[in-house]
Image (tube, rainbow, N blue to C red):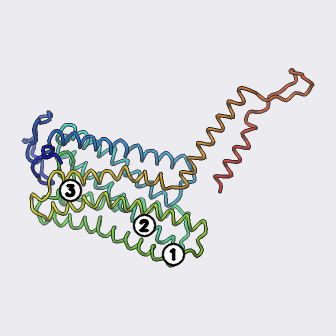
């Protein structure tokens, strides 16, 4: 790696001092605790990619969910909740760090930093808790034979995930710990480097209730599920059961990708909190942060690529519009007529152009109903 791209190791978090704010012009050389100009360019490109595709991918998921009625299932309500939280992160969080990276410094001061740290933490915890609930839903559906199809519990779970997240992300705004600038100085998070008993107590609780326990619950659910699947084997492996297993695999893939994206950041944050002051370098703080943000791009891709029902609906919609367009062109070129007399054009009447489309509509509806 090019040593000139990054400067000397900084603290992961540091406090604002208004008297130390510099001009908007980016420095031509790297200063201690900051990235070099080349490093800020790389960071800006990465954040721009995450911001753009994270927003677009999740927006596509929301559009598909609104368009196709068959996708509005109880389990998909939780996946939709993850997409909403990821899209909001890209809109109100990643945009701020992207603009700051272009300018080489944080632009919005202490209030903006607290806002950024709060919304990123809040939306990240919402996604994690939604995955925990999804894991339990798969566990209860496949092992306890719970009845599915009711929306009351999923909607309560969605509301509960937001309430739980607020419980753990509002306290820094009220004085229990705080949010501060981290890494290269262009993003904010919990003040990991503050060496006080109050801050350490909050960070320990945050890791226990917003990382440790959720991961343990997911591991327990999937271990029990894998054991149950192994016991059942090929017995009663009908079409409905196979669909449940496919949903299980999709949710499990989402969980694994989420943990791969967020665990490095958690490890670096713990090192910054309880390790030596200079244990975290700029690369070690920036790269895990980018990896965590990339989960907003990966989650919707998993949902789109692994959802059989979604792919079927999109394929049917494309085929339907292609055939319908072809039918319209055919009618324009050779309109069908029916005459009451031999060659009598006066008594001829046009056949309704939608008549030939009835068979196509019936065919598409039959496939969708299956």
Q: Is residue 128 left or right of residue 42?
A: right
| Quadrant of image for the C terminus | bottom right
Mark 1 vs mark 3: in front: 1
Mark 3 vs mark 2: in front: 2
User: In this view of the protein, which residue sits in the foreground, 28 or 88?
Assistant: 28
Which residue, given by chain and number where applicable, does mark 2 sit on? 135
**Dot 1, how many residues are within 10 Å of its Cα: few (below 14), some (14-19), or many (20+)?**
few
Give the tally of numbered discs. Answer: 3
Residue ranking furthest to the front: 1
Which image quadrant is residue 71 in? Answer: bottom right
Which residue, given by chain and number where applicable, does mark 1 sit on? 144
Which x, y percent locates residue 172? 21, 57
Q: Mark 1 to mark 3: distance in Å? A: 40 Å
Secondary structure of residue under mark 1: loop
Which x, y percent locates residue 22? 10, 37
| Residue at x-position 26% and y-position 41% | 98
Do the residues under discs 1 and 3 have CB atoms within 8 angstroms?
no
Do the residues under discs 2 and 1 have CB atoms within 8 angstroms?
no
**In terms of sequence position, does the residue under pointer 1 or pointer 3 come before the other?**
1
User: In this view of the protein, which residue sits in the foreground, 173 or 254?
Assistant: 254
Which x, y percent locates residue 217? 36, 71
In the picture, the disc for residue 190 is 3
**Dot 3, how many residues are within 10 Å of its Cα: few (below 14), some (14-19), or many (20+)?**
many
Q: Is residue 148 left or right of residue 324?
A: left
Q: Mark 3 to mark 2: distance in Å? A: 27 Å
| Residue at x-position 14% and y-position 57% | 280
| Residue at x-position 26% and y-position 53% | 118
**In terms of sequence position, does the residue under pointer 2 or pointer 1 come before the other?**
2
Q: Mark 2 to mark 1: distance in Å? A: 13 Å
Q: Is residue 356 left or right of residue 303?
A: right
């Amino acid at each position: 790696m090019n040593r000139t791209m990054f400067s000397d190791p900084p603290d992961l978090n540091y406090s604002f001092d208004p008297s130390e704010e510099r001009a908007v012009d980016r420095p031509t050389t790297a200063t201690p605790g900051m990235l070099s100009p080349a490093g800020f360019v790389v960071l800006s490109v990465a954040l721009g990619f995450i911001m753009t595709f994270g927003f677009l991918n999740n927006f596509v998921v929301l559009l598909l969910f609104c368009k196709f009625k068959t996708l509005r299932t109880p389990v998909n309500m939780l996946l939709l909740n993850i997409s909403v939280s990821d899209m909001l992160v890209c809109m109100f969080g990643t945009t701020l760090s992207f603009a700051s990276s272009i300018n080489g410094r944080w632009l919005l001061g202490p209030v903006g930093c607290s806002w950024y740290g709060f919304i990123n933490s809040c939306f990240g915890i919402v996604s994690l808790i939604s995955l925990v609930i999804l894991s339990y839903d798969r566990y209860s559906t496949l092992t306890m034979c719970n009845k599915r199809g009711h929306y009351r519990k999923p909607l309560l779970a969605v509301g509960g995930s937001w309430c739980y997240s607020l419980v753990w992300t509002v306290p820094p705004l009220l004085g229990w710990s705080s949010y501060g600038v981290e890494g290269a100085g262009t993003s904010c998070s919990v003040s990991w480097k503050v060496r006080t008993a109050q801050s350490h107590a909050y960070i320990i609780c945050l890791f226990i209730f917003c990382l440790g326990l959720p991961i343990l619950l997911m591991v327990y659910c999937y271990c029990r599920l894998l054991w149950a699947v192994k016991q059942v084997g090929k017995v009663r492996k009908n079409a409905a059961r196979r669909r449940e297993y496919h949903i299980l695999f999709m949710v499990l893939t989402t969980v694994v990708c989420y943990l791969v994206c967020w665990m490095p950041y958690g490890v670096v944050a713990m090192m910054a909190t309880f390790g030596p002051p200079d244990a975290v370098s700029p690369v070690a703080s920036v790269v895990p942060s980018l990896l965590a943000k990339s989960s907003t791009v990966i989650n919707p891709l998993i949902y789109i690529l692994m959802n059989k029902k979604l792919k079927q609906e999109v394929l049917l919609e494309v085929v339907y519009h292609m055939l319908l367009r072809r039918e319209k062109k055919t009618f324009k070129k050779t309109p069908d007529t029916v005459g009451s007399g031999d060659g009598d054009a006066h008594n001829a009447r046009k056949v309704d152009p939608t008549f030939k489309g009835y068979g196509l509509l019936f065919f598409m509806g039959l496939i969708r109903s299956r």
